[in-house]
Amino acid sequence: KAGVTQTPRYLIKTRGQQVTLSCSPISGHRSVSWYQQTPGQGLQFLFEYFSETQRNKGNFPGRFSGRQFSNSRSEMNVSTLELGDSALYLCASSLQEYTEAFFGQGTRLTVV
Amino acid sequence: AQSVTQPDIHITVSEGASLELRCNYSYGATPYLFWYVQSPGQGLQLLLKYFSGDTLVQGIKGFEAEFKRSQSSFNLRKPSVHWSDAAEYFCAVAPTGGGNKLTFGTGTQLKVEL
């Protein structure tokens, strides 16, 4: 059974640009969550989607957005990139509500 | 707001020695509790979870954790550490009835001396 797949694995972007990251959950999983991991702030929750609806949102500016498609695949978008957005972005999928989350390998975003 | 504290930033143990990583949480009710492990540049791998029931839970790779409600703790243990256990360990909580939103501790970096 394939795990959570995140693409791309690495990205380098310039300040002011926007970026889209993709996440394919484990087959049959309906919940997808996104996290940002940085050395200074640690692991922080961005948002969660369940059956195409955003169910939870963390404390991030509106530049961070996401969506989920009918096949449960999810994308997150960051507009007007700042240097501080450089981080490892992790996606996690869960079968349904209140079950354990399985993480992908992450996308390493570097903003220069 | 819920929070998770991992008081030990770094721990060094000798191979074959026992290990205990501490985790305390702050939450109004009993949350769902998890331990994850992360190797450099990789994602998070779930070691074990506690939802309800038996307070001693077994996980993968020989790890176990004990939930103590009175101490708001969920410490991770392993009787004999292997060099391959060197990694960063994260304790996390999710609110009951609050979806799959995890709050993580700051992590404990484990070094294993041969």
Image (tube, rainbow, N blue to C red):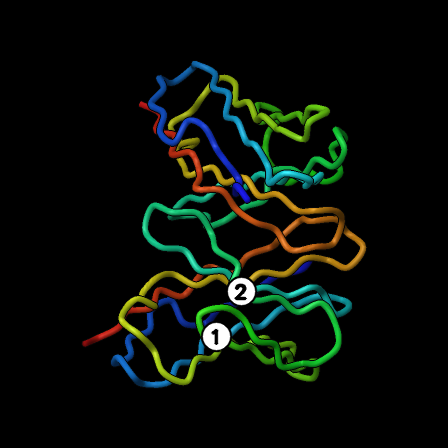
> Could you tell which of marks 1 and 2 lies nearer the N-terminus?
2
Q: Residue at x 59, y 80 (%)?
A: B66
Image coords of residue A43 (percent x, y)? 50, 49
Which of discs 1 and 2 lies nearer the camera? The answer is 1
Q: Residue at x 68, y 41 (%)?
A: A29
Front residue of this view, candidates A13 and A32: A32
Q: Which residue is mark 1?
A: B63
Which element is circle 1 on?
loop
Q: Chain of mark 1?
A: B
Q: Residue at x 70, y 35 (%)?
A: A49
Which element is circle 2 on?
strand
Query: Horizontally, is B21 left or right of B69 in the view?
Result: left
Image coords of residue A54 (percent x, y)? 74, 33
Query: Horizontally, is B88 left or right of B76 in the view?
Result: left
- Residue kind at label 1, given as amino acid type: Phe
Q: Are marks 1 and 2 in contact (CB under 8 Å)?
A: yes
Q: Residue at x 67, y 60 (%)?
A: B2
Q: Residue furthest right?
A: B97
Q: Chain of mark 2?
A: B
For residue B58, above or below residue B107: below
Q: Residue furthest front?
A: A1
Q: Residue furthest left?
A: B114
Quarter of the image with the C terminus of chain B is: bottom left
Residue B35 is tagged as 2
Image coords of residue B38 (percent x, y)? 41, 55
The quarter of the displayed image where residue A34 is located = top right
